[in-house]
């Protein structure tokens, strides 16, 4: 049976798409973003065992060469995440579609929809296609909308597979300049920009998400390029400004400055001046 590697599931979220949503965070990512706020979702556990000595409650064990996780013993200290050399998590679960549907049914009265996130959800494309198809076919769950939070690094063939059963896509934009984008993520942005057009033309692009970091990608050149690209789609396109904060980040981004409200307001004003009016800004700054 088709299974997904799941990092965690939130049964209630108001920041991962419209309304109240259940969010499935899938493990593994094809980007290595310097500003990633959940870097432990990037790698996939290779059973090296480095996490075993720091797991004091012995929730992690090595059995037949594989890391085994016992959630009943875990104290949520996350020491295993901090020591992992490949930004993975040994606490993932292997779940099938029925497992997810069972959780969705339990929380259905409080939900508007389902969002798959990550990591990068589209790396497990067959699973999310099967999941969304099952939700659409289930008379008790078919009213739930199915959304994807993605870095956009998926080709046309993949989008043609998933878009028919998808209601909305939230697409991250780290930089418009391809060299800067590669510096920030380890990948170019050609696939992302092409994907945004594919998804928009299908009527499924819910929003572009721009991660703004001071003195990194908030330059006039970048803001102008963002505006130009957004206008090439539609002046009404929804753009969410995600203000970079230090919470959860590792590596060189720890030396960056946090983005404050004053600078976000300046970016918003600049985008408004280009004719973009549907700009969403953070409700709070941590």
Image: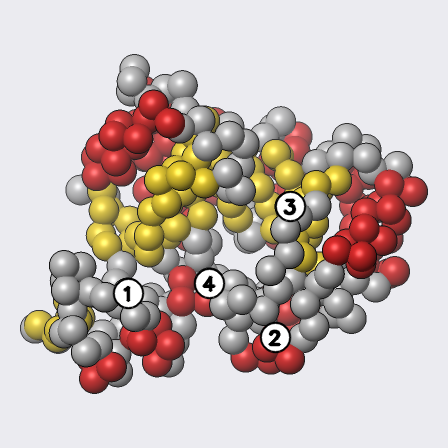
Residue 143 location, x and y as percent? 40, 19
Q: Secondary structure at mark 4?
A: loop
Position in image of residue 122 (x %, y %): 44, 48
Circles 4 and 1: CB atoms closer than 8 Å? no
Q: Which residue is mark 4?
A: 38
Q: Which residue is mark 3?
A: 283
Closer to the N terminus: mark 4 or mark 3?
A: 4
Q: In the shown orientation, is residue 248 left or right of residue 90?
A: right
Disc 2: CA contacts within 10 A as few (<14), some (14-19) or many (>=20): some
Give the CA separation, mark 2 to mark 4: 13 Å
Residue in view at x 70 percent, y 41 percent: 280
**Cβ–Cβ under 8 Å for marks 2 and 4:** no
Q: Secondary structure at mark 2?
A: helix
Looking at the image, is 173 positioned above or below residue 188? above
- Quadrant housing the C terminus: bottom right
> SS class of the residue under badge 3?
loop
Which of disc 1 and disc 2 is earlier in sequence?
Answer: 1
Lateral position of residue 97 relative to residue 42, left or right: left
Residue 46 visible in the picture: yes
For residue 76, which numbered disc appears in the image? 1
Question: Marks 2 and 3: which is nearer the front?
Answer: 3
Assign a secondary structure to mark 1: loop
């Amino acid at each position: 049976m088709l299974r997904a590697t799941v990092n965690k599931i939130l049964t209630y979220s108001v920041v991962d798409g419209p309304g109240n949503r259940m969010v499935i965070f899938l493990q593994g990512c094809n980007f290595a973003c310097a500003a990633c706020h959940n870097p432990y979702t990037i790698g996939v556990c290779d059973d090296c065992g480095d996490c075993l000595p720091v797991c004091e409650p012995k929730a992690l064990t090595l059995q037949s060469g594989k890391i085994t996780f016992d959630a009943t013993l875990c104290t949520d200290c996350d020491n295993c995440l901090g020591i992992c050399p490949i930004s993975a998590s040994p606490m993932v679960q292997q779940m099938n579609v029925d497992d997810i549907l069972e959780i969705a049914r339990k929380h259905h009265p409080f939900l508007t929809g389902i969002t798959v996130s990550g990591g990068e959800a589209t790396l497990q494309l067959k699973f999310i296609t099967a999941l969304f198809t099952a939700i659409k076919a289930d008379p008790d769950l078919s009213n739930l909308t199915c959304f994807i939070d993605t870095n956009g690094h998926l080709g046309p063939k993949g989008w043609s597979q998933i878009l028919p059963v998808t209601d909305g896509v939230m697409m991250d934009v780290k930089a418009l300049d391809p060299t800067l984008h590669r510096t920030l993520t380890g990948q170019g942005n050609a696939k992302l920009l092409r994907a945004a057009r594919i998804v928009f033309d299908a009527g499924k692009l819910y929003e572009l998400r721009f991660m703004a970091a001071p003195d990194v990608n908030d330059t006039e050149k970048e803001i102008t390029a963002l505006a130009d690209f957004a206008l090439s789609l539609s002046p009404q396109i929804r753009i969410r400004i995600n203000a970079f904060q230090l919470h959860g980040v590792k590596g060189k981004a720890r030396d960056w400055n946090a983005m404050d409200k004053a600078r976000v307001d300046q970016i918003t004003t600049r985008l408004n001046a280009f004719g973009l009016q549907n700009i969403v800004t953070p409700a709070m700054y941590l």
